[in-house]
C-alpha cells in the first residue's frame, strides 16, 4: 500500500448535502436525477469520445454515490471513512453486554416465529416488525448524535459510533430475515 493514502470521494459534497448521518431520502433521489440529467447520453450525441467517457464516468459516480448515501450502513461507513475512521463491520466485536443481550433476544424471537404454526403468527410478526423499526429509528438518531459529537481523539467516542453502526447492521439483517418470514406466509 502507498504511504500516501487516497482520499475518498465525498459523496455528500457531490450531492450538496451536509456531512450528517440523517438524510432526506426524497431529496437525495431528486438530486440524483438532477445530476444524471447533466450527463444524459442525448446531450452528448455529437460529443467527442473523451467527453462521452467523462459523462459516462460521472454518471457511474453519481449512481455509486446514491447507492451509498441511500443505505444507512454504507452511509455511516462512508462518513467514518471521510473522518479517517476505518473498521471491519463484518468482524466487529461488541463489548456492550446490552447490545449483545438485545441481539440475542431478537434472534430468539425470529427463530420462534419461524417454527410457530398457529394463528398468532401474524400477530407475532407484526409485534417484532414494530419493535425492530422502533429500535432502528432510535439507533439512527443515536448514530446521528454520535457523528455530531465525535471526538476522534477519544477512542471511546469512536468505538461507540462503530458499535452503533454494527448494531444497526444487525437490525437491518433481522428486518430482512423477518421479511423472508412474511413472504413465506403469503
Image: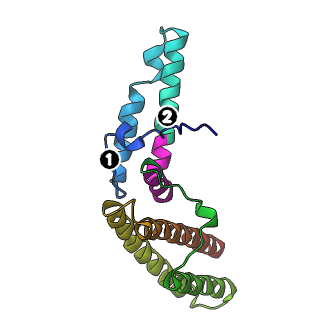
Q: Picture quarter containing residue 37? A: top left
In the rendered image, residue 130, in percent from the top left (x then y), is placed at: 44, 79
Which residues, given as a range, are shown in magenta? 65-80
Which residue appears at 41% of the width and 71% of the height?
139
Colour mapping used in the image: rainbow
In the rendered image, residue 168, in percent from the top left (x then y), is placed at: 49, 69
Residue extending furthest toward the right:
115
11 lies left or right of 183: left
> Would you name the residue on which mark 1 appears?
27
Q: Quadrant of the N terminus?
A: top right
Q: Please identify the dominant SS of the magenta region.
A: helix
- Using the image as rendered, state which of residue 37 and residue 76 is in the foreground: 76
Q: For numbered disc 2, what is the local secondary structure?
A: helix
In the rendered image, residue 167, in percent from the top left (x then y), is placed at: 51, 72
- Using the image as rendered, state which of residue 3 and residue 105 is in the foreground: 3
- The numbered disc on residue 61 is 2
| 73 within the magenta span | yes
Which residue appears at 32% of the width and 53% of the height?
24
Give the distance between the C-alpha atoms of the residues marked 1 and 2, in whole angstroms: 18 Å
Amino acid at each position: 500500500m502507498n504511504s500516501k493514502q487516497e482520499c475518498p470521494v465525498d459523496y455528500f459534497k457531490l450531492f450538496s448535502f451536509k456531512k450528517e448521518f440523517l438524510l432526506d431520502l426524497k431529496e437525495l433521489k431528486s438530486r440524483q436525477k438532477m445530476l444524471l440529467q447533466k450527463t444524459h447520453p442525448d446531450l452528448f450525441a455529437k460529443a467527442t469520445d473523451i467527453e462521452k467517457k467523462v459523462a459516462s464516468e460521472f454518471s457511474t459516480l453519481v449512481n455509486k454515490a446514491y447507492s451509498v448515501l441511500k443505505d444507512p450502513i454504507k452511509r455511516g461507513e462512508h462518513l467514518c471513512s471521510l473522518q479517517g475512521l476505518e473498521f471491519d463491520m463484518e468482524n466487529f466485536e461488541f463489548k456492550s453486554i446490552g447490545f449483545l443481550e438485545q441481539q440475542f433476544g431478537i434472534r430468539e424471537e425470529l427463530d420462534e416465529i419461524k417454527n410457530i404454526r398457529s394463528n398468532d403468527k401474524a400477530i407475532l410478526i407484526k409485534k417484532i416488525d414494530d419493535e425492530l423499526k422502533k429500535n432502528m429509528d432510535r439507533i439512527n438518531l443515536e448514530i446521528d448524535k454520535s457523528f455530531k459529537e465525535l471526538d476522534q481523539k477519544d477512542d471511546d467516542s469512536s468505538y461507540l459510533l462503530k458499535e452503533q453502526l454494527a448494531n444497526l447492521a444487525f437490525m437491518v439483517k433481522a428486518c430482512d430475515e423477518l421479511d423472508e418470514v412474511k413472504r413465506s406466509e403469503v
